[in-house]
Amino acid sequence: MRQITQNYVDGAFQPVSDGEEAPLFNPATEEQIGTVRLSNVNDVNAAVAAAKRAFTRISGTPPAERAEMLRRLSVAVSVNGDRMAETMREEYGAPSSFVDFSARRAGSVFLDMAATLESFAWQRRIGSAEVEMRPIGVAAAITPWNSNYGFICGKLATAIAAGTSIVIKPSEMSALQTQVLTEALHKAGLPAGVLNIVNGSGAVAGAALTAHPDIAKISFTGSTVTGRAILQSAAETMKRVTLELGGKGAQIILDDADLEAAVAQVLASGFINSGQACIAGTRVLVPARLMPEVRDRLVAGLADWPVGPASDPASRIGPMVSRKQWERVQSYIRLGTQEGATIIAGGEVRPAGLDRGWFVRPTLFADVDNATRIAREEIFGPVLCVISYDNDEDAVRIANDADYGLQNFVLGGDPERTWRVAARLESGRVTINGAAHEPLAPFGGCKQSGIGREFGVFGLETFLEPQVVLT
Ligand code: TXE
């Protein structure tokens, strides 16, 4: 049993004041593997005070010095990739392919941001105005558990590039991963107080941080419910916010798609990160006349998506992160049947042979009405809704009939047609035929998927404020 009892404040590991402890679990075995001490308001205040002192120094550094810091952070994180991957496998349980990708990319986000920083226009002339992009003030980040390293590193990289100090409150369910990552980040030798990490619950530490008057900017990734609470709390002192919230992406299979490739792609985009991904394409839109064939292909395709622990290299779907998430997914599977959808694969209860661990059977619902809750709410597990449409117009209408708008997908044979459909979708991102991720492109959503964009130039600008001098 490991015990996490320290925060990282002012360049050093410091004890959390006496407080409650939360258990940490291995989701593949349900065994408790550690505890984390939860910070109180005083711990949060100490971290914000350290960040405020450091802001004066970091905000005055030249961009080249900050690019150097980013390169040091990248090295510090990358050399710890194996240890990070091992801890993520144990505490989060995702399949090896996702863990390896996540642990490796964590270091590279710093290099992506260094590249953005070096070509960024800090001064701009607009008519008679001299516009200077200046760091916004002390930042706070609140991150979730479904890619702990990636979210922490992405937000930290942007803060450093912008010249702001930051206080990060990661998910209380990821404390072992946070500890390993923080030890790595410490080795980069940032000026004291530029990076501060507090362990704590959302209700206490998260709420204290997002309400703190000395915080100028909040970058949050998590649920829409919490995002809404943060937005309300931020309004008090007009904090700037970036909110990266849930999704309910549509995957539109056009009638000229290569069905074999399209179905493989649909399953990959639907089951990414065991379905615990805001970008997952969880509504599969299928032309009515092709429905019988696509249904059969989807069911057959599940053979390529074995469920199991991260220790089994064949696993492609791991456990849900917690009992609470497992129960949530089970309740949606129950709800789907009550709402009149047909289960064509999977269903409630654990997969055969996995009687321990928060594993879910990959589940496909057919005959789904887009108005029902399983089609509208984020389930956050390996559960896909298959929905029939009549023509391209109808597909676009159904895809856009959603409260979310993070990422949609189009699969088809005619490039012009796929573009035409993509251009009409209401989401921050559209992926055509499984195109690769572009790390410098803006990431974020429309509607209730959030506010603002992360990564690259667009992400950097959300940590900056333009100041105009008229001459
Ligand atoms: O999220 P929370 P939960 C969605 C997904 C999932 C659901 C619930 O649908 O099933 O949210 O997950 C902190 N003030 N996503 O309950 O509560 C909390 O401590 C400040 C989508 O885990 O949003 C943690 O650090 N902070 C998502 C972080 O918010 C607060 C990723 C996220 O937890 C707080 C995760 C408060 N009042 C869940 N309350 C994505 N976009 O990828 C909680 N927190």
Image: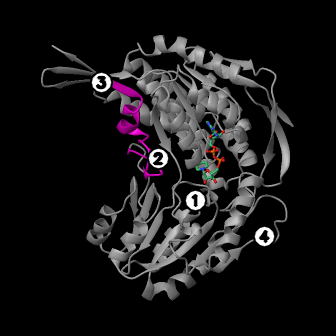
Label 2 Cα neighbours within 10 Å, binned few <14 / some 14-19 / many ≥20: many
Residue 378's label in the rendered image is: 1
Q: Earlier in the sequence, mark 2 or mark 3?
A: 3
- Residue type at numbered disc 3: Trp
Magenta stretch containing residue 444, yes or no? Answer: yes
Residue 349's label in the rendered image is: 4
Magenta stretch containing residue 37, yes or no? Answer: no
- Residue type at numbered disc 1: Glu
In the image, residue 49 sits, relative to residue 350, either above or below, namely above
Q: Within 8 Å: ligand 1 and the Cβ of disc 4?
A: no
Give the residue pinned by disc 3. Answer: 122
Counting from the top left corner in percent of width and height, residue 403 is at 47, 58
Q: Earlier in the sequence, mark 1 or mark 2?
A: 1
For this view, does 121 lie left or right of residue 38? Answer: left
In the image, the segment drawn in magenta is: 441-465
Tell me how far mark 1 sits from mark 2, CA to CA. Answer: 14 Å
Residue 450's label in the rendered image is: 2
Q: Earlier in the sequence, mark 4 or mark 3?
A: 3
- Residue type at numbered disc 2: Gly
* Count of numbered labels shown in the rendering: 4
Tell me how far mark 2 sits from mark 4, CA to CA. Answer: 33 Å
Q: Judge by depth and name the residue closer to the eye, 49 or 64.
A: 49
